[in-house]
Image (tube, rainbow, N blue to C red):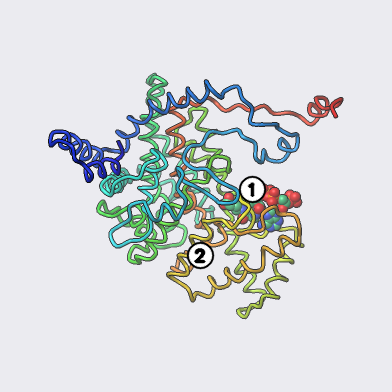
Amino acid sequence: MQASALRSALRNSRQPIAQAGVARRAYATAKTQTLKERLAELIPAEIENVKAVRKEHGAKAFGQVTVDQVYGGMRGLPALLWDGSVLDAEEGIRFRGKTIPDCQAQLPKAPGGSEPLPEALFWLLLTGEVPTPEQTQALSKEWAARAQLPEFVEEILDRCPPTLHPMTQFSMAVTALNHDSAFAKAYQQGISKKDYWGPTFEDSMDLIAKLPNIAGRIYRNVFGKGKLPAIDPSKDYSANLATLLGFGDNEAFVELLRLYVVIHSDHEGGNVSAHTGKLVGSALSDPFLAFGASLNGLAGPLHGLANQEVLIWLRKMKAQIGDDISDEKIKEYVWATLKGGQVIPGYGHAVLRKTDPRYTAQREFALKHLPDDPLFKLVGQIYKIAPDVLLEAGKAKNPWPNVDAHSGVLLTYYGLDQMNFYTVLFGVSRAFGVAAQLIWDRALGAPLERPKSYSTEAIKKIFANKP
Ligand code: CMX
């Protein structure tokens, strides 16, 4: 029984004392149950659930696969299982059925805070349940306890030239964590397939826990921000991340990070970073190797690097036009970008066909915390102009802004204005979604991915005599 159901059962209880006692003990257990214990309970039922779905529907077809889909980046091709989140083209993302506003309303928050804690989101992604505040806090503590980096990983980062892109450093450090992978070790020792999820869970917890130290170290090394402070086990994940970056005293920035990590955590399975992690994990590469690969995909300008590109684009716009920017000048600049054969960064999406609710959540944060910031106003002004230009240009299927159109402006406002670091924060967040799915993939015995590829010659032959 879920904690909330138990709570209400207790509240409404007219049961004999003995039964109420049992319920109270069950509630106390549920309240303190760890994430791993809860998962261990959920996995057998989900294995049966999947078996039943496959038995009933396994031979049914989703529909046709067209030649255009093979050439067109597999858009819309139903090909992957991903339980943590589902993306609707019109509505945007839902994490285990919950929208971003649902998460803001229902997930536990820090004392005095109003944004959901990423710890709670990870619990939700893995179990489909909202954790209690105690369980959320226990995750903060557990991650703090697992946060330390092996010395050799610190040395790898310290030896990187500051000119090496932060995302390259990030991916190197994450990949190197494979040195201590519980999964890789267990596999060498002959672990049974049914037990794969246990060490995958341990590696995933270590991975998420160590990311603030990696991100903080890269930030301080690359931008000359001094020595990294220690993780504080009494603070939540985002507060520690903020402290490691040097912004721990600013509670509004900590709140921003909580929201940031939650909204960037997962965007169903087909995007490049998520799919790459799943694909590499399917070879039974451990979570560090799998997520290192995710990061290399996230580092592409059509994916996560777009948050850096947006800021570069905005700065160029300001340098070209000056501070007094009229709608007409913005329109001209957007057209000039398109005519130069470049994309408008932060606009468009492979799946979404409306304004990204992750953009909206950040806009609402800005309206609350920085309504008069000139760069925020500029982003809002572009929002009124760019979609019409993209529509008129007639190519992009979605002229609306995505998550990356807004994030850099918020970070810049608080003083984190080193834009080539932005994708690292996206990467810290994306680990939550990828790790959750990696754990379920191993629990459900997901097989090696191996889709079929065709050459153009083969395609010509297959369809030569077909209408
Ligand atoms: N500016 C200019 N042209 C755009 C565009 C944009 N923002 N968005 C799409 N287009 C173009 C595409 O480049 C494509 O042109 P070609 O036919 O010449 O190749 C055409 O419109 C059709 O593309 P689409 O089907 O609408 O979009 P895709 O699924 O191919 O691509 C995306 C999606 C996100 C890569 C694209 O919209 C884009 O490049 N946007 C800018 C980069 C960006 O913001 N990326 C971040 C996405 C979110 C994330 O993953 O972080």
Q: CA distance from mark 2 to mark 1?
A: 22 Å
Q: Which mark is residue 350?
A: 1
Residue 420, image x, y percentages = 53, 58
Which residue lies at the image location 67% right of the left edge and 31% below the top edge?
A: 63
Residue 66 appears in which quarter of the rendering?
top right
Q: Which part of the image, by quadrant, shows the N terminus?
A: top left
Mark 1 Cα-neighbour bin, 10 Å: few <14, some 14–19, many ≥20? some
Q: Number of numbered discs present?
A: 2
Please indicate whether residue 334 sits to the left or right of residue 228 in the image.
right
Residue that protrudes farthest toward the bottom in the picture: 324
Is residue 354 positioned above or below 454 on the image?
A: below
Q: Which part of the image, by quadrant, shows the C terminus?
A: top right
- 296 and 59: which is toward the camera: 59
- 98 and 316: which is toward the camera: 98
- Residue type highlighted by circle 1: Ala
Q: Is residue 160 visible?
A: no
Is residue 381 positioned above or below 97 on the image?
A: below
Residue 315 appears in which quarter of the rendering?
bottom right
Is residue 364 positioned above or below 396 on the image?
A: below
Residue that protrudes farthest toward the left in the picture: 17
Which residue lies at the image location 50% right of the left edge and 56% below the top edge?
A: 162
- Residue type highlighted by circle 2: Arg
Q: Secondary structure at mark 1?
A: loop
Residue 7, image x, y percentages = 25, 44
Quick check: is the Cβ at mark 1 less than 8 Å away from ligand 1? yes
Q: Which mark is residue 361?
A: none
Please indicate whether residue 177 sits to the left or right of residue 462 in the image.
left
Residue beneath label 2, please?
Answer: 363
Mark 2 Cα-neighbour bin, 10 Å: few <14, some 14–19, many ≥20? many
Q: Going from the N terminus, do you reach mark 2 or mark 1 first?
A: 1
